[in-house]
Amino acid sequence: MPSTSPLLPVALFVAVFAGGCVLASPDFDGDSEAATATTTGSGGPTTTTSGAVTSLGSASESDAGTSGSASEGSTSAGTSTTTTATSEPTTTATSEPMTTQTTEPTTGDVTTGEATTGDVTTGEATTGGVDPGTYELTPEVAACVFRANANGPYSKSGCAMNASSQVAEQNLMMYDTAVGNNGGAGRRAEGYVSFAIPDAWAGATITAATVRGQAADWAWIDTPKAGDLVRTESFTGASLDASAPATIDTLDVNTMKVNDTDWVAWTVPVNLVVPGQTISLGIMPSDPVGMFLRKPTLELEVVIE
């Protein structure tokens, strides 16, 4: 019987094992996690299996038939056949499913999802259910009054009649430092106007507010100044019959010289435009030449964005 050298099986095993270490993954791209797993696998069967299963995570469960068999084979037997099976199937299963499953959900839900852009930036909740735009509110009350002096009493009705007698037109608001014509008796005339802010504007972003009105036709010898807008204590039409409200502060001074049919305007601070509340204002004379405004044209213009 021919003798057998005890070193022959060892030499064959080393040759086969060395051949298994130079197998390259056909999907290697230098950047993916699959490429990392394959490179690690070249060092030995047991290390390769552990790295591939850890990188796959839940993704390996979707391809349980492929990655599962590769894992079990390389753990139980460290032969050249097992090393080849671990290198190729594990790389394929890791590179394609992981890249697809990670990229698409992240982009859709976090970066450009409708929930982020629609609800926060441009949703209706931002404007309190009110469409952005410019709104005009008509007055709750619009009237003028004569202040009492030594020559005449306080009067709301007397101011309205005097204004209509000077300008052949009804529904006028007059304000003047001293009215001498048609029974004015040198009394001071002041205008008052209030606006109810809608409850529906709660939560809306109000960016501007302006009181506007048109001057009535009048053959002025000298063009008067538009006058001053003040904030007053609250009032009603009935309360104005008895007395004028106290002035709180001046909101805007308009020194524009007004001509016939001009539109005049005063700025109102937006923090005073409160949904569900009424803003009470006075239009005061700043010129000895009287001013007349058409009450139907008076409005509070509000801009909502």
Image (cartoon, helix red, strand yellow):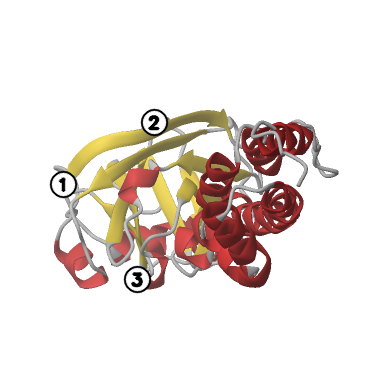
Looking at the rendered structure, the secondary structure element under dot 3 is helix
Q: Give the class, few, some or many, for how many residues have Cα within 10 Å of label 1's Cα (few <14, many ≥20).
A: few
Q: Which mark is residue 286?
A: 2
The quadrant where residue 71 appears: bottom right
Pinpoint residue 132: horizontal percent, then vertical percent: 58, 59
Seen from the viewer's position, the closer of residues 103 and 265 is 103
Residue farthest to the right? 26
Callout 1 amino acid: Ala
Residue ID at (19%, 40%): 248
Callout 3 amino acid: Asp
Contact (Cβ within 8 Å) of mark 2 with mark 3: no
Q: Which mark is residue 199?
A: 3
Query: Which numbered disc, 1 or 2, marks the residue that appears first in the sequence?
Result: 1
Seen from the viewer's position, the closer of residues 304 and 179 is 304
Spatial CA span between label 1 and label 3: 26 Å
Seen from the viewer's position, the closer of residues 182 and 104 is 104
- Which is in the foreground here, disc 1 or disc 3? 3
Callout 2 amino acid: Ser
**Vertical placement of 26 versus 117: above or below?**
above
Query: Which numbered disc, 1 or 3, marks the residue that appears first in the sequence?
Result: 3
Q: Which mark is residue 246?
A: 1
The quadrant where residue 117 appears: bottom right
Pinpoint residue 154: horizontal percent, then vertical percent: 18, 55
- Number of numbered discs overlaid on the protein picture: 3
On the picture, is 35 further left or further right than 68? right
The quadrant where residue 11 appears: top right
Pinpoint residue 294: horizontal percent, then vertical percent: 54, 59
Q: Is residue 133 visible?
A: no
